[in-house]
Structure formats: C-alpha cells, structure tokens
Amino acid sequence: MKDQTVDVIVLGAGIVGVSAAYAARQRGLAVVLVDRREPGSETSYGNAGILSSGSILPLNKPSLWSALPSYLTNRHAALRWDPGWAMANIDWIVRFLANAAPSRVKPRATALHGLIGESLKLHREWIVKADAAQRIRETGWLKAWRSDALAAAKEEQTFLAEYGIASEVLDRQAISALEPNIVPLYKVGLLHTQTASVDSPGAVVKAYAKMFASSGGEVRQSDIKAITPDGERWRAVLADGAISAHHVVVALGPWSADLLRPLGYRVPLAFERGYHREFMPNPARSLQRPIHDAEGSFLMTPMEQGIRVTSGVELTARDAPSSFAQLDQVVAVARSVVEFGDAVGEPWRGARPTLPDSLPVIGPAPRHSGLWLAFGNQHIGFTTGPATGAAIAAMITGTPPPFDVSAFSPSRYL
C-alpha cells in the first residue's frame, strides 16, 4: 500500500502534540496527529489542571539545596527516589543540581515567563473556540503555609512582581474568607490572581483535538514503531501502515527519547513521576480553587469527578511498578483540610518528562532537516502546551515564533 502523504506528522496527542497539530493546521498545512491512545489520555490527563501564570521557577532552584538533607531520608512527601535509578542516572542528577545555582534562576525564569504568557493567551482563546469555556475557572490558585511563613510568601510575591505577575499575600482570616469550607489550618497564603484552572485537563485536551479535527486535521490512533528519513521527507512507521511528510514533530513526552535514539540522539530525559486520586466531594463544603499545601507537598483541586489530590515527585524509571506511599501520605493530610468521601476510581500515575535545566526542547533537531522536537515540559506541560505547539508551527512555516525560543533550543543537549 502507498504511504499516506501529508505536510506534517505530529507524534503524541498530549497537550503539546495537540497544540502543535492545531497550530500547524491553522497555518494551512495538512496534518496528521498520531498516538497509541486517545488525545489527552496520558500525562496531560493526570495533572492538577492549573493554567499557572507564576510557574516560572523550576524545582531545581537555590532553595533545593537546603531541602536536600530532608529528601535524603526518602520519606518526604515532596520527593521519593529509587537508589538504583539514582546510581544509574547520577550524571542527570548532577546536571539537575548544577542548574539550582543562583546564577541560573533569572535566565530560566525569563524564558518560562515568555512561554507561559503566550500559552495562557492561547488557552483562553482556544478553550472558547473548542466549546469548552464552561471548564475554565478564573479563580486563581492558592499556595498556603501552616507555619508563620510570611517572609517566604512576601519573597515569592516580590520575585513574581519583577515579571509583572500579580499575587496577594493573605492571612488566616483572608484565607478563610476566600475558602470558607476548609479547616482554618493555614496561617499564610499567596493567591496567584492571574492564574486559571480547569475541571478536567484531559477533557480540555480532547476538546482541542476535536477542534483540530473540525478544522480539517486527522487524528489517528496507532502504535508508533519508528521514524526514518526518506529522501527529503520523513516516514512514520505505524502498527497499521505508514505516513510520509516533509515534517515530523516528536511530542511524545516521556516516550520521546526512545523514538529518537535510533537516529543517534541521546536525550538526557528523566521522569518525575507523580500520582493522583479523586474523591467524592461534599457538595456543601466545596473547594473554590486549587490549593497547594506548601509544607504538606501536595495539591488538592476541584475536578469534574471530585476532589483530586496530587502527590509530589517520584524519581525512578518511567515504567517501574507503582508505589503509592507518597499518595497515601498526602491524602491523609488533605483530609485534615477539606472534607471528602470515598475514592472515585483507581489511583493514577504519570511521568513528567524533565531535562536537567527543567526547560523543554522546542525547535529543530540539530542534525536532521524537517525533524522537530517538542517535549520536556516537566510539571507545567498543561500550562505551556499551546505556546510550545504554536512555536513549532511557526518555525515549520519559516516565521518567527510568538515568544523567544532561544533558551529552549534542542541543540543545548543534542
């Protein structure tokens, strides 16, 4: 059978891949979006659904050094790690920690601020176009401390203000006024006022994919076996056939490195695994917005199916067996804050793809024309997906991206 022929193949139907496919289709290109599962069914499904204006500081920031001793116990809710994985990936760990230097803060924050700002504009535009505007809440999100952390809250507020990001420091009374249905445990809060959230990130990604299909794009569900250069084109080999195109976009999140290895690329990608579980809410005592318990190292957020409680980071192999110790630890603490009932469904696990500098790769592969890379968006993939995709589509058509992409160049690692 003759290969299907299009302008662009996008591999991966998470928020980044769907965004790249839709943005390319908006530019008049013939696009096929391919994934083994339905759009929004992997990492893009399991996040906290926050469209975060203030997530410009990666986890590997200077304060990480003071937290390391508590993490080494391997009992902290914020971080669990597999010793065998750590020994095998010591190079990645060293590079990750090296990026926690003070001199590395502002360049990365500036880069992420540009990426996030453009993404939030697109999210707010696309969610209306996709007929999913009922899913977005413009209520901000709250970071809260049980201790007297006023100095820490003000320091974070000052840092965000340098980038024009608004926030409000709250005391216990103000937090209770904002969230009257939670137990008044928190002494200090920082409300990110320019942040939105959605009640189902997976459903939003599916709505964007449907919008892409309605615009003339094709969504194809199939296992992706390989990509190979074919003259001036690329050939994507699928379980049920092959597709030929001038451009191929690799947006497979934590699976991206596997596909690129046969082409000679050794991507230093690690997997910050995370878990969530949803619980039956008490309609009379509902949450109004996502809340990040700073000392408890978890996030709880109102979702379509109930209260979603998300865990911290687990550093281990992408496909290692699940360990629910972190999740069980934080669920017990979350119950002390907000009332919720039995679990709705099974625990969920995902793998957040992270490069040593906590910045994604967005741009052309350095040694292959027509090969585009868009992955590594760590904890903020749902927030940053639209602009990541829009930048790739712009570069494919030879036009300037809508923000400065220089910090995200794949050539910094490849």
Image: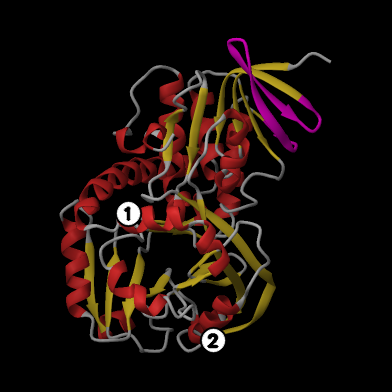
Identify the residue under disc 2: 332
Amino acid of disc 2? Ala
Residue 398: image quadrant is top left
- Image quarter (top left, top right, bottom left or bottom right) of the N terminus: top right
Q: Amino acid at mark 1?
A: Ser
Left or right: residue 14 compared with residue 198: right
The residue at 58%/10% (across/down) is: 232
Q: Quadrant of residue 273?
A: bottom right
Q: Quadrant of the C terminus?
A: top left
Instruction: Answer above or below: position of 148 versus 59.
Output: below
Label 2 residue SS: helix
The correct choice, above or below, for 382 with respect to 60 in the image is above
Dot 1: few (<14), some (14–19), or many (≥20) neighbours within 10 Å? many
Q: Residue at x 19, y 52 (%)?
A: 103
Which residue is most to the right? 1
- How many numbered discs, if any? 2
Rendering coords of residue 21 (x, y %):
55, 31
Name the spot of residue 138 as percent of width and height, x first. 38, 58
Residue closer to the observer: 292 or 282: 292
Span colored in magenta: 219-241
Give the residue pinned by disc 1. 53
Which residue is depicted at the point 55% across and 45% down? 253
Residue sitting at the far top: 231
User: Foreground residue, 189 or 362?
Assistant: 362
* Whether residue 37 is situated above or below residue 315 in the rendered picture: above
- Is most of the magenta stretch helix, strand or loop? strand
Q: Earlier in the sequence, mark 2 or mark 1?
A: 1
Whether the magenta-drawn stretch holds residue 220 is answered as yes
- Residue 334: numbered disc: none
In whole angstroms, how far apart are the C-alphas of marks 2 and 1? 29 Å
Residue 79 or 386: which is nearer the viewer? 79
List x then y, in percent, for residue 324: 62, 75
